[in-house]
Amino acid sequence: MYVGSTGAAGVMQLVIEVLQNALDEALAGKATRIDVTVDAQGRWTVEDDGRGMPLDMHASGRPIPEVLVSELHAGGKFKEGAYTLPGGLHGVGLTCVNALSAEFTLDVRRGGQLWSGGWAEGRRVAPFQRAGDATSTGTRVSFRPDPTIFGAERADPQVVERWLRSQCWLTAGLTCTLNHPGGSVSFSSDDGLAGFARWLGGAHELVHADPIVTTAAAGAADVQVDAALLWTRAFAEEVVCFVNHVHTPLGGAHADGFRAAVGHALTRYARETRLLDPTEPLDGSDAMEGLVAVLSVRMRDPHFEGQTKTRLLDTAAGQAVEAAVGAALAAWLRAHPTDAAAIVGRAIEASRARTASRRASERARYERVEHLVDKEIYRQQFGIRSKNWHTSADWITNRGLLGLHGGSSKMSEDAVILDVCCGSGVVGASFRGKVGRIIGLDLTPEMVALASTRLDEVILGDVYEIPFPDNTFDGVCNREVLHLLPQPERPLSEIFRVIKPGGQFVVGQWVPFSAVDGPWMFQVVKKKQPLFVNNLYDEDMRALLDGAGFINVTTEEFLQWEDIDNWIATWETPPLHRHQIKDLYVHAPQEVRDVHPFEISATGAIRDCWRWVIYSAFKPG
Amino acid sequence: MSTTSSLPAARYVQPALKETLTCEQLESSFRDEAMAATECAYFARIAEIEGEPEMARALRELAEQHTINARGSLDLLMRAREPLTGRPFGNTRSNVAALSAFYGGDAEAQQNRSRTARNEGFSDISSWFTSLSRLRHAHSERLAALLTKAEPTDP
């Protein structure tokens, strides 16, 4: 399968293929507009104002455009000299789109003539022939992906919007328009990659005001390298890479060369200027923290891993990028000492935070079972995370998930409940209107302050030693905490102790889908959260509740899609781990993919489906 | 005149490999090569992320070499026993049977490791071993089901 998937990613690849053909006209300096329309039925139409495909006759006796859309490796761009640096699927693009479409039409305006033809499931239904006169030039491709191949899967207009937006920054003088059922949007840019980097920086606080822009032809392979770099105060890095305007979400040689250039340039500058102690380490990944960047490489005959061009293989391109970006960045740092000090300071800060995070993980374990957890580590982490708690992950404020917690209540309207490890208090607040009074308990002063805006009363305290007498509450609620607590039996026995006989305990926890995705998920979560100690399966949760003395356990399940890129953009996750988490998704074993749904979009963004189980249990009356 | 040699054909007789020190050392070599292959490939990716592409390339090439070497040791071990279980192996049925037996036995071993880690205060490592134990069970069942399905049925 040349498009890589029969899911939404495959449909997106079809759209990108047609767009890439239009873009090639713009890159050749022959088109200034690309207009894209998608209708409610999922039909995509892409129109450019380029020269229009050549209407000459092919050696087979048919018009060239007809051959282009119905025969593999017949692309006109593969005739010597037609395009200097083409994108697309090596001459199979339009043929693939046609073969995988329920309907496909092609209109070409060239030399004062309009020619049209139609296909269905790759078979010609209307011959490609002259249909009238034309006063302009250009090519228009319209297609509806075949539902017998792709089912109801659709390409996401937002991803297409990002593609068009990107190409306008990469291509001077290009205007793109996207019309979709939700509205219409148009893009053009006169500030190139600098504008792209500013857009990637978004609302983040910036370390320096203006992007660092480099442009150079480098290396024996005659590679043109353009880049824009902008450091922010965010935790995650975002480097968007292109080869001949094709986005390479998995990076490759050019991305590796870029990382090397940035790491080496910052380390060298830091040591030269004595900002960094000679014995203090500074990893390349520290230098990249908070960096948003665009890297565009143009080269002849690039080699990719896979037909969909997700990863560049050419080592020479990597060396060219490393040389070009390294030299330009080193010169920029020397010429801008104030900004350079801020950027290097940011990297040193990242390095020290990484070391602190690793030490936190080491200190969080018991040396012996009777020792208590180092509570200060929890306070520190959640104190920092409280600053953007509600935007740091989707699950925290997901209404459906919260609704299942409050909705599990079997307590009376005057019941008093305790929200244990309450965080910002959203779980306790989901019981509002169902019980009489909601009290919160949390270890972190910052979280206590947050929860105080939602709950009736919030106490600073520890779940291992709940500061209330036996049989105090009609119920207790809690969510996604037990996996962070060594010896979870102990907090559970404390919870059991403070619930009145007959009282209810409601606890939500994500769990693996099966034994097969358990170790994979362990690695994902452990790399994100160093305090993670219990990979709790459904059977573990039931055994814990049973062991604590709870009875009448019932459950509700909830599937929630989490934005992984956002979830891992957090203080406690070091840059190396963010990359490794993405690798775990990209290279997930097929066995895992079969049981655990997740999506990687054409831009490389990852969404994971988490299996939540909400347990309701009772203390015997 | 005949040119055929009157000497008998050379015969090279080796002792049985099983239960020899050489067999044990071959198993050790296999383990080392397999471990080194995993480490090199993993470290190569870390080198890429840390912006060290030359070291990454070298490590990837070493990983390829270790993988080939591990397979070389495994080929020689086919004369004796499968190193994880001590069972005979070589063709697909016997290979799968050996792995199925390994997974079944290792599920219990991982559970024991989990208990040790927990007793020594390493909650996360204990949980990791438990997760592996469950996966071993699942893999053992998967391969056992395949073997059952592949059994020839009586007419």
Image (spheres, coloured by chain):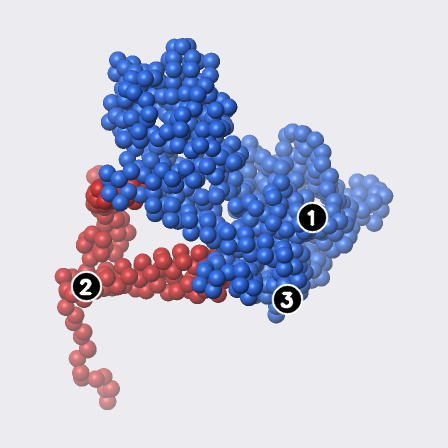
Chain colours: A blue, B red
* Contact (Cβ within 8 Å) of mark 2 with mark 3: no
Q: Are marks 3 and 1 on the same chain?
A: yes
Asked if residue A157 lies left or right of residue A616, the reply is right
User: Which residue, given by chain and number where applicable, does mark 1 sit on?
Assistant: A195
Q: Is residue A526 found left or right of A294 in the rendered image?
A: left
Graded by Cα atoms within 10 Å as few (under 14), some (14 to 19) or many (20 or more), the crowding at tag 1 reads some
Cα distance in 3D space between marks 2 and 3: 54 Å
Residue A578 makes an appearance in the image: yes
Q: Position of residue A360 (x, y in %)?
A: 38, 45
Identify the element where label 3 is drawn. Answer: strand
Marks 2 & 3 on one chain: no
Q: In the picture shown, does residue A328 fall above or below B114?
A: below
Given contact means CB atoms under 8 Å apart, are the residues at marks 3 and 1 in contact?
no
Q: Earlier in the sequence, mark 3 or mark 1?
A: 1
Indicate the amino acid at tag 2.
Cys
Q: Please, what is the three-letter code of the amino acid marked with disc 1?
A: Gly
Q: How far across and down, in percent of the image, does residue B50 sit?
A: 48, 57
Q: Amino acid at mark 3?
A: Ala
Where A218 sits versus A504, above or below? below
Classify A416 as above or below A255. above
Identify which residue is drawn at 44% across, 63% down: A279
